């Protein structure tokens, strides 16, 4: 039998396609200031709590704006983009269904605030099947620090090694690896060039047959 007894998902870019939407928000914010978004800044912001990400943006371009100003502006832009573009990542629906049927305890650990996560996940009726959601505003140290996954392990009453964690970014994967979990990296188009050294598996997508084998799930075929 598998030693994995619970599954924890990152949200942005792992469950939801939001990591592909955030750069659109950032690009719009910078365009308003006569600036352009680069891949370097995108990578520096990805997977981090909003205050840290916006501070990176301020430092990168020596902006006069405060974190609060950027947060409010981003929320307004993001709300418009969400209505047209929010969706689930390929393979999540099928995987999540089988995990529920197999009675794995399930949770989400995200750098987004807990309230934002509950809103986004609630749009797809995901939250009723979760043991809990931990937001980036509920831990002292955000990803890539392992605190959020160590907190999840404590809440689940399991050792980190008994928890499979799905992450799409280098920042998030490092948090999962350093916490001692079974880290499964699922890079998207936004993170294929990231380093996932230390991950037990680098999956192609959530459809990857190896994920099903590791979690001892029945075939979708």
Image (cartoon, grey):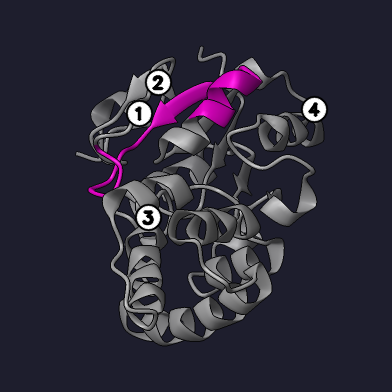
Q: Pointer 2 and pointer 1: residues touching (CB < 8 Å)?
A: yes
Q: Residue tagged by mark 4? A: 157
The magenta region covers 174-192
Q: Tell me if I can see residue 46 in this picture.
A: no
Mark 3 vs 4, N-terminal side: 3
Q: Residues within 10 Å of mark 2 (few under 14, many from 20)?
A: some
| Residue 34 belongs to the span the image colors magenta | no
Q: Is residue 204 above or below residue 20?
A: above
Give the side of residue 93 with respect to residue 179, left or right: left
- For numbered disc 2, what is the local secondary structure? helix
- For numbered disc 1, what is the local secondary structure? helix
Q: Residues within 10 Å of mark 4 (few under 14, many from 20)?
A: few
Which mark is on residue 93? 3
- For numbered disc 4, what is the local secondary structure? loop
- For numbered disc 3, what is the local secondary structure? helix
Q: Position of residue 125 (x, y in %)?
A: 54, 69
Name which quarter of the figure residue 34 lies in.
bottom left
Q: Residue tagged by mark 2? A: 214
How many angstroms separate mark 2 from mark 4 (CA)? 21 Å
């Amino acid at each position: 039998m598998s030693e994995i007894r619970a599954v924890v998902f990152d949200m942005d870019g792992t469950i939801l396609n939001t990591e592909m939407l955030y750069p659109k928000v950032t690009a719009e914010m910078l365009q308003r200031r006569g600036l352009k978004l680069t891949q370097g800044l995108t990578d520096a912001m990805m997977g981090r709590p909003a205050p840290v990400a916006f501070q990176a943006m301020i430092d990168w371009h020596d902006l006069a704006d405060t974190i609060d100003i950027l947060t409010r502006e981003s929320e307004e832009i993001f709300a418009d983009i969400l209505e047209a573009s929010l969706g689930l990542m390929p393979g999540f629906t099928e995987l999540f269904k089988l995990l529920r049927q197999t009675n794995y305890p399930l949770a989400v650990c995200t750098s987004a605030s807990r309230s934002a996560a509950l809103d986004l996940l609630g749009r797809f009726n995901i939250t009723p099947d979760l043991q809990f959601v931990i937001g980036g505003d509920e831990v002292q140290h955000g990803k890539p620090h392992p605190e959020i996954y160590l907190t999840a392990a404590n809440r689940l009453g399991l050792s980190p090694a008994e928890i499979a964690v799905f992450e799409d970014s280098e920042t998030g994967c490092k948090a999962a690896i350093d916490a001692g979990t079974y880290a499964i990296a699922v890079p998207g188009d936004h993170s294929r060039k990231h380093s996932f050294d230390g991950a037990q598996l680098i999956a192609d997508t959530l459809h990857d047959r190896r994920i099903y084998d590791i979690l001892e799930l029945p075939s979708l075929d």
